[in-house]
């Protein structure tokens, strides 16, 4: 299964000891999950990790190698309704990567999509994803 990680999930995994996002990183390989993200999310992660203790940066050094990094996809031929224009490249990149699941913690910008499918790609939180995988 290909799982697209929004920068909010990556930052949470690096910055919080109890994060369910971190659990996804830790069990992805044994579950056969391929973690995917885009260059835009990588830049957002690097920018925001400066707000966390140095342990988050050390974790990032490991976790960034567990992600398949793809170039940003900026357009799609399909109609896409998303109010936050800054997040459109993230969602379009996930669709271009042909991911089955899009994980985000950004309830503000993705609230209307959470729990729904966008062109057969489930948009959900790490918590709800883990529950649906039988881990919660």
Image (cartoon, rainbow, N blue to C red):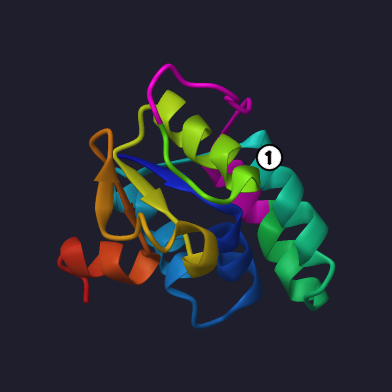
Decide if residue 95 is in sight here: yes
Q: Quadrant of the C terminus?
A: bottom left
Q: Residue furthest top?
A: 77
- What residue is at 67 percent from the left and 35 percent from the top? 39
Res 97 seen here? no
- Residue 119 appears at what percent x and percent y? 27, 33
Report the magenta residues as a range.
62-79
Residue 73 falls inside the magenta stretch: yes
Rendering quarter of residue 49: bottom right
Horizontally, is 85 left or right of 4 in the view? right
The residue shown at (39%, 28%) is 79
Mark 1 closeness class: few <14, some 14–19, many ≥20 residues within 10 Å: many
Point out residue 38 in the picture as x, y percentages from the top left corner: 60, 36
Quadrant assignment, res 11: bottom right
The residue depicted at 38 percent of the width and 65 percent of the height is 126
Please indicate whether residue 72 sits to the left or right of residue 98 in the image: right
Q: Which residue is pictured at 71% across the width and 55% down the height?
A: 45
Magenta-drawn stretch contains 78? yes
Establish if 105 lies above or below 7. Answer: below
The residue tagged 1 is 40
């Amino acid at each position: 299964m290909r799982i697209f990680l929004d920068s909010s999930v990556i930052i949470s995994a690096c910055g919080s000891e109890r994060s369910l996002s971190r659990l996804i990183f830790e069990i992805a390989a044994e579950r056969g999950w391929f973690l995917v993200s885009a260059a835009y999310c990588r830049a957002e992660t690097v920018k925001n990790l400066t707000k966390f203790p140095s342990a988050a940066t050390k974790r990032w050094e490991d976790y960034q190698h567990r992600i398949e990094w793809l170039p940003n996809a900026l357009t799609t031929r399909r109609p896409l309704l998303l109010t936050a224009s800054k997040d459109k490249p993230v969602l379009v990149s996930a669709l271009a990567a042909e991911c089955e699941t899009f994980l985000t913690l950004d309830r503000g910008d993705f609230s209307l999509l959470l729990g729904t499918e966008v062109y057969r790609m489930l948009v959900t939180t790490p918590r709800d994803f883990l529950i649906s995988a039988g881990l919660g």
